[in-house]
Image: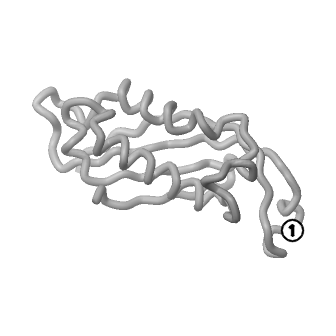
Amino acid sequence: MYAIEVRDHVMIAHSFRGELFGPAQGLHGATFVVDVAFFRESLTPDGVVVDIGRASEALKTILAPLNYRNLDDLPDFSGKNTTTEFLCGHIHAAMAAATRAGALGPGGEGVSRLRVTLHESHLARAWFEAPLA
């Protein structure tokens, strides 16, 4: 299995509901480093997994509506705890849709799996990985 990974970051604010979250129940900020890995069985005729530039632009486009926003105020996240794990799934779904829509250009149709990793710090990270449906 071949893979490439692109990276960006996003700066958000949010709060959580539930005693489990302790002080994080209050509004707080987070800066996540976001990695997206694209997997395929064989390389394209050009010898790549996907165009890294297009993959980077697709990630930037997906993160733009979240950047410098309070996620508590976004209708799509109403009533949800926007945990790191939750955000991994959200970004994965958006990248899967972008991949199926052709955002990665020629060769993108050969991507069989995606992994989205959000790094909360140098000590903690979460990810969501699944095949493209």
Colour scheme in use: one colour
For the point 30% across and 33% down, the residue is 104
Q: Residues within 10 Å of mark 1 (few under 14, many from 20)?
A: few
For the point 72% across and 42% down, the residue is 12
In the rendered image, the residue lying farthest to the front is 75
Instruction: Determine whether, in the image, residue 38 is placed left or right of residue 123.
Output: left
Q: Position of residue 107 (x, y in %)?
A: 19, 35
Residue 4 appears in which quarter of the rendering?
top left
**Local secondary structure at mark 1:** helix
Residue 43 vs 75, above or below: the answer is above
Which of the pair 90/88 is nearer the observer? 90
Q: Position of residue 131 (x, y in %)?
A: 31, 59
For the image shown, how many numbered marks are present on the structure? 1
For the point 67% across and 64% down, the residue is 80
Residue 68 vs 113, above or below: the answer is above
Q: Position of residue 133 (x, y in %)?
A: 28, 59
Residue 70 appears in which quarter of the rendering?
top right
Kind of residue indicated by mark 1: Gly
In the rendered image, the residue lying farthest to the left is 45
**Residue denoted by label 1:** 22
Which of the pair 121/70 is nearer the observer? 70
In the rendered image, the residue lying farthest to the bottom is 19
Q: Position of residue 40 (x, y in %)?
A: 23, 48
Residue 2 vs 93, above or below: the answer is above
For the point 85% across and 63% down, the residue is 25
